Image: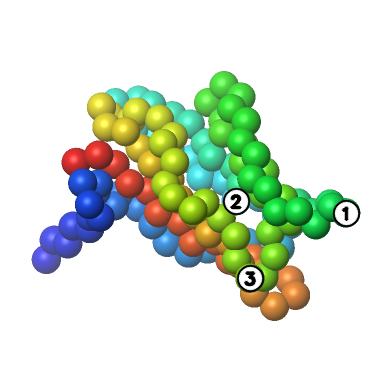
Amino acid sequence: MLISLSSGNYDIIAGGQVFLFAKDKDFKIDIQGDEGAVFSIVLNFTENESGKQDIQAETNGNKIMVTCLNFKSTGTGLKEPVKLAKVDGRDLYFVFWSYLEGEGSRSVKYTFFAEK
């Protein structure tokens, strides 16, 4: 049986939920296209005294660092998919949402979309 997932005009090419080793540990995703494109996305979860939630992204070569500031248990993440790159001739999009599960675990749900 072959199952294909899509939403609107986009194929869902990957998605899932992970639990991080600890609530403040990074989540790294390495992406390699069939035509040789290689890059990484690193979600870094940190807190400061301001308490203000924010997402900041920085690109350094083939690494996209996403700093997730003050993500709490109620859940925080991207409100809509963001375009990351063109991989194998198709635009690649990414969306995620993070929760604190109890006192020490962080859960991250994520989905990757590609143009049909």
Above or below, 12 against 104 in this view is: above
Mark nearer the viewer, 3 or 2 = 3
Quarter of the image where one finds residue 88: top left
Q: Position of residue 36 (x, y in %)?
A: 35, 25
* Residue at left offset 53%, top offset 59%: 97
Q: CA distance from mark 3 to mark 2?
A: 19 Å
Mark nearer the viewer, 2 or 1 = 1
Q: CA distance from mark 3 to mark 1?
A: 18 Å
- Numbered tag placed on residue 22 in the rendering: none
Quarter of the image where one finds residue 56: top right
> Element under label 1?
loop
Q: Which residue is mark 1?
A: 49
Asked if residue 112 lies left or right of residue 26, the reply is left
> Element under label 2?
strand
Q: Which residue is mark 3?
A: 74
> Element under label 3?
loop
* Residue at left offset 11%, top offset 66%: 1
Q: Amino acid at mark 3?
A: Thr
Q: Residue furthest left?
A: 1
Camera-nearest residue between 27 and 112: 112
Q: The C terminus is located in which quarter?
A: top left
Q: Amino acid at mark 2?
A: Phe
Q: CA distance from mark 2 to mark 1?
A: 23 Å
Camera-nearest residue between 85 and 61: 85
Q: Amino acid at mark 1?
A: Glu
* Residue at left offset 70%, top offset 65%: 72
Q: Position of residue 60 (x, y in %)?
A: 61, 24
Q: Which residue is mark 2?
A: 27
